[in-house]
Each structure stands twice: as structure tokens, then as C-alpha cells.
Image (spheres, helix red, strand yellow):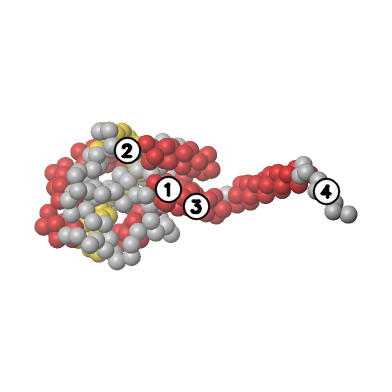
Amino acid sequence: MSEFARIAILIPCHNEEVTIAKVVSDFKAVLPLADIYVYDNNSKDNTNEVARHAGAVVRTEMRLGKGNVVRRMFADVEADVYVLVDGDDTNDAAIAPSFIRKLVDDGLDVVSGRRVAVGGSAYRAGHVLGNRLLTALAVMMFRLKIADMLTGYRVMSRRFVKSFPVTAEGFSIETELAVHAGRLLMPIAEMDTWYTERRHGSVSKLNTWRDGFRILFAIAKLVREERPFVFFTAIFALLALLSLVHTRAMGTEAPRLSRD
């Protein structure tokens, strides 16, 4: 990748001491000239020390939430190409050079990883269903051309990163990343990437229901901001439907006998 002066690997982490050393070493192997940044999100384990010993530049973001970490990363780090990847060792580092090559050769702003599960528990059924439903909703609302909105593996241009206004605090950051590209009509693409099971001792920070609802609310907020006519029309239609149901229910209520 000699075309680039600077490639930055951005790895947000919260309690990933079990996996972070391997993630850092894997990316050092495939992108030896890249700068690797691990942002420790107030971990209670030895993530910070392990990442530093593995050769990463380690910084700390005390405000909990992946959105807070990404906001800090995008503001701090200067590069020409950015690789954003989780620190849980579920993503395939070996595909990163292909992502970067496609970004450059095709003049894109984002190449994201479309996850292909390896192992029975790599991608839980609830997560698969939730991702499909939320992705379908975002595609419909924002006219996006993506199949895996909630992937944590993306390669991005400097233009994308430095124009991105992060407002999310948690996992809804993935939604904002997808919608931002659509908002500015930036050229994007997806490529398949292996998605493996977490290693023993590594615990997922994603709660299916809690984070699913947070992402849903994030989509609603973005629809209100980006497509207010659609948002308020939907609200009006919902209220009208509820009013109709209530009226019919009142109309069919059984008459009460008078005591007179």
C-alpha cells in the first residue's frame, strides 16, 4: 500500500485483555506500515497494558460507550485511510489489504465487512434477526445499499472520517456510520469477511434487546432529522390508527344495565 503516507488501524476496546494482543499482531502482520491505535474505554482488566506490550499506541476514553470512543478516535487520529475494527478478534485481519485496495481502486469512501459466520455461536440467532430487521428498516428509510449495517469492520477515507458528526454514545454508532455515507451520497461498497466465534474468556458487550431498541431509536431520530416529512407522516398515521381502534372498541362495548 505504498500509495498512502498514512494508514491508521483504530481499535475501540472495553475489557478485551484476552483478545487484543492477537488483534494487534494480526494487523501488524498484514499492514506492517500502519499505525495501530487502541482506545481503552475505561476497561477494568489489563487491556491497556496488553495492547501497549503488543505494540499499539494506547489511549484512554473514560466515557463509556463505543460512540464516545469513535468520536475521540476520529478527532484525534490523522491518516489517509482508516481501518475501524473491534478488539474482540472476531474479524479477519487478512482481508484488510483487499478492503483498502478496493477503497482506492474504485474511488470509494467506505468499504464495510459483510459478515459470514464461522462456527455455530459466532453470530447468535437473535443478533442475525435483529441486524436484518434494522438494516432493512434503514435501507427503506435512507435508501442505502447495504446488507450488514451493524458490522464493526470498516475501511474509510479521510473525507468520510473528518466529515462525520458523531452523536451516538453506544452501539448505535454503527447506524450513524452507515447513514452518514448515504446522507452525503458517498460511494460505498461491501465485501464478505469471515466472522468467527469469540475466544474462551472473551465476553460480548452487546445486549440483543437493550442495544436493539437503542439502535431503533437512533434510526427514528435520524429519520426525524433527515426525512421529517416521512417521520411525522408515520406518527400521524400511527395516531390515526390508534384513534380508529379506540373508537371501534368504545362503539362495541357492551351496554351496562341501569339500576333504576
**Can residue 166 be seen in this snapshot?**
no
Pick whichever of labels 2 and 4 is earlier in the sequence.
2
Secondary structure beneath disc 1? helix
Q: Is residue 192 left or right of residue 257?
A: left
Q: Quadrant of the C terminus?
A: bottom right
Number of residues whose C-alpha sits closer than 10 Å to that of mark 4, classed few (under 14), some (14–19) or many (20 or more): few
Location of mark 2 (residue): 123
Residue bearing the label numbered 1:
209
Q: What is the secondary structure assignment of the residue under circle 4? A: loop
**Mark 2 vs 3: CB contact within 8 A:** no
Q: Is residue 34 left or right of residue 141?
A: left
Residue pointed to by mark 3: 217
Q: Earlier in the sequence, mark 2 or mark 3?
A: 2
Of labels 4 and 3, earlier in sequence is 3
Closer to viewer: mark 4 or mark 3: 4
Instruction: Tell me the crowding category of disc 2: few under 14, some 14 to 19, or many 20 or more residues within 10 angstroms, Cα based.
Output: some
Q: CA distance from mark 2 to mark 3?
A: 23 Å
Q: Which mark is residue 257?
A: 4
